[in-house]
Image: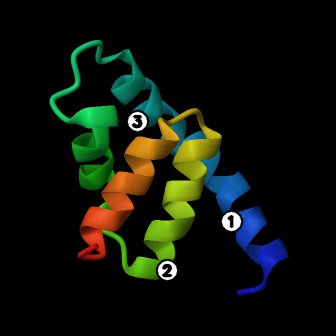
Amino acid sequence: MNAAQRNQAVTMLIEDVQPVVDSINADKMPTTRNAYGRYMAVLTPFNSQLRSIVADACIAAGANAQGVTDALRALSGG
């Protein structure tokens, strides 16, 4: 997948992930720092390539970038 295809995939997913991101953002007392636990739950079902695309879509939809990055790191064993 080239960069243009990846960007198109991210753009197409924003509308789908927006309600989830809004729900996570509305939680005023997250149980993990930057809500990474909630983002980890969102990203877990996907393989590593798709996970990265969904993560970028979440960030584009207004997700806490550090929380999403921390979730990706935890899921990759880092």
**Going by the image, does 18 lie left or right of 23?**
right
Residue pointed to by mark 3: 20
The span from disc 2 to disc 1 (Cα, nearest Å) is 12 Å
Q: Please tell me which of labels 2 and 1 falls first in the chain.
A: 1
Q: Secondary structure at mark 2?
A: helix
Residue 66, numbered circle: none
Contact check, label 2 and label 1, Cβ < 8 Å:
no
**Going by the image, does 36 lie left or right of 22?**
left
Instruction: Give me the residue at 37% from left, 79% from top.
Output: 47
Q: Amino acid at mark 1?
A: Ala
Instruction: Give me the residue at 27% from left, 54% from top.
Output: 40
Residue pointed to by mark 2: 49
Q: Secondary structure at mark 3?
A: helix
Q: Please tell me which of labels 2 and 3 falls first in the chain.
A: 3
Residue reaching furthest top? 28
The span from disc 1 to disc 3 (Cα, nearest Å) is 17 Å
The span from disc 2 to disc 3 (Cα, nearest Å) is 20 Å
As displayed, is residue 67 above or below residue 77?
A: above
Q: Please tell me which of labels 1 and 3 falls first in the chain.
A: 1
Q: Amino acid at mark 3?
A: Val
Residue 9, numbered circle: 1
**What is the x, y in percent for residue 53?**
56, 66
As displayed, is residue 78 above or below residue 39?
A: below
Rendered image quadrant of residue 37: top left
Q: Nearer the viewer, mark 2 or mark 1?
A: 2
Q: Amino acid at mark 2?
A: Gln
